[in-house]
Amino acid sequence: MYINAGRLYQDAVQIASTIQSPPSSLQARRESLASILFATMSLEAFINELHHIALEFASATSAPVQLRVLGDLLEEAERSRASIASKYQLAKFILSSQPFDKGASPYQDFALLFDVRNLIVHTKPLEAKLRKDSSGKVVWVEPKIMVRLQNINVLEVTDYLKGSTPEAGELISDLVAEISTQQIALWACRTAVRIVEVILNAIPVEFAAITNTFYRKQFSTTTQP
């Protein structure tokens, strides 16, 4: 079995923390985009690897019952093509008897991160719209994901866009370009480590030595940029 989730996360951190080009440059946007995608890939890899690790070790005499249940139900989730978010909810409930609170961090940021990822890999060109609010401040208005990123203070409006937005009406910009920033890449890395740590903290003590070896150091707040 190959364990790649931690490597993908480390790649995301490395890229995000070493972006040096001007924020609006093509190079900075490419690096930011790569970091965001690596962060989401690490989360997908982690839950899928956990599924197979659970199946492999569930037959051991000392294996906790949650391990067998986790492996079996994640297997069913895979067969039914369940979403990554559903797999995380399932794992959290099996391991701790409590689901993630969908209205709170870290799940809220986790769900938003995958919405960002889905927009990035969408095949058609996507537009983002800005306009001035009642106080004259330039804000994102569409799509809703831009508003959500703005509300958690990880998406800003550049001075260029502020200067280009008309007094009345809307300004249209390239959505993927606007979310490909170092600020969002760093947020993606923080989000990834927080959601993984919740799952690792819920792992039964009899199995924690294995998952800690594979993931605890790689997904760590000390490795965040």
Image (cartoon, rainbow, N blue to C red):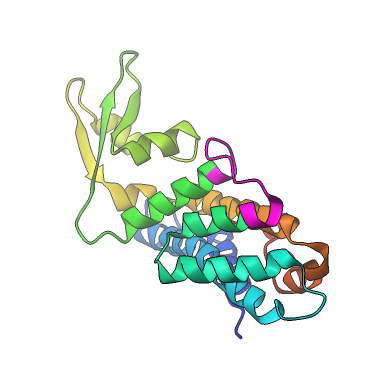
* Location of residue 130 by image quarter: top left
Residue 140 coordinates in the image, percent (x, y) = 32, 32
Is residue 70 in view from this perspective? yes
> In the orientation shown, which residue stands out farthest toward the left?
169
Q: Name which residue lies at 49% across and 40% down.
A: 154
Can you say whether 172 is above or below 61 in the image? above
**Residue toward you, 75 or 190:** 75
How many numbered markers are drawn?
0
Give the magenta part as a residue range.
93-107
Q: Is residue 177 magenta?
A: no
Can you say whether 209 is above or below 105 in the image? below
Horizontal arrangement in the rendering, residue 103 relative to residue 150 (left or right): right
Q: Is residue 106 magenta?
A: yes
Q: Name which residue lies at 28% across and 39% down.
A: 143
The quarter in which the C terminus is drawn is bottom right
The quarter in which the N terminus is drawn is bottom right
**Residue toward you, 14 or 94:** 94
Q: Name which residue lies at 42% across and 71% down.
A: 79
Q: Name which residue lies at 27% across and 59% down.
A: 122
Residue 35 coordinates in the image, percent (x, y) = 49, 62
Residue 76 coordinates in the image, percent (x, y) = 48, 68
Dominant secondary structure of the residues highlighted in magenta in the image: loop
> In the orientation shown, which residue stands out farthest toward the bottom?
1
Is residue 193 in view from this perspective? no
Residue 109 coordinates in the image, percent (x, y) = 52, 44
